[in-house]
Image (cartoon, rainbow, N blue to C red):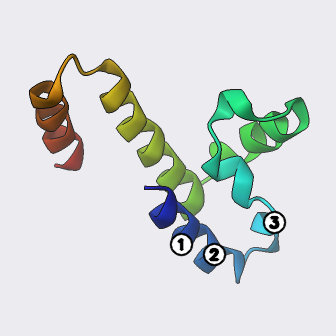
Amino acid sequence: MNEALDKVRREEQKNDPELKYTRYIWLYNAEKLSISKTRKLASRRNSNKKTAKAYQLKLNLQYIYKSANNKVDAMIMQEEWYS
């Protein structure tokens, strides 16, 4: 998922210089970011950019794997997420 997210960001940054030098704020887990990078992420993650949407998909997928009780649950939740 991180590879797909970074691909979206790279494409979008060609027309949006605001996304330059933001690679790691999208790829790292939010709890591992510094305070300044957390603020930077917070200001960008609710935008209408493709990168922000891809980031939200990443978070949704992470939630599935954190909340699933077993492999079968994860597969069912992933199918629902995908559809």
Residues tagged 2 and 1 counted as in contact (Cβ below 8 A): yes
| Disc 3 packing (10 Å; few <14; some 14–19; many ≥20) | few
* Image quadrant in which you'd find residue 66: top left
Q: Residues under labels 2 and 1: Cα distance?
A: 5 Å
As helix, strand or loop, the secondary structure at mark 3 comes to helix
Residues tagged 3 and 2 counted as in contact (Cβ below 8 A): no
Q: Is residue 28 above or below residue 49?
A: above
State how many labels appear: 3
Residue 29, percent across and down?
62, 37
Q: Which one is closest to the eye, mark 3 or mark 1?
A: 1
For the point 17% across and 22% down, which residue is it?
70
For the point 65% across and 44% down, which residue is it?
28
- Of the residues shown, which amino acid type is indicated by label 1? Lys
| Disc 2 packing (10 Å; few <14; some 14–19; many ≥20) | some
Q: Which one is closest to the eye, mark 3 or mark 2?
A: 2
For the point 75% across and 65% down, which residue is it?
19
Q: Residues under labels 3 and 1: Cα distance?
A: 16 Å
Q: Please tell me the numbered disc located at residue 18.
A: 3
Where does label 1 land, which residue? 7
As helix, strand or loop, the secondary structure at mark 2 comes to helix
- Of the residues shown, which amino acid type is indicated by label 2? Arg
Residue 1, percent across and down?
42, 55
Where does label 2 land, which residue? 10
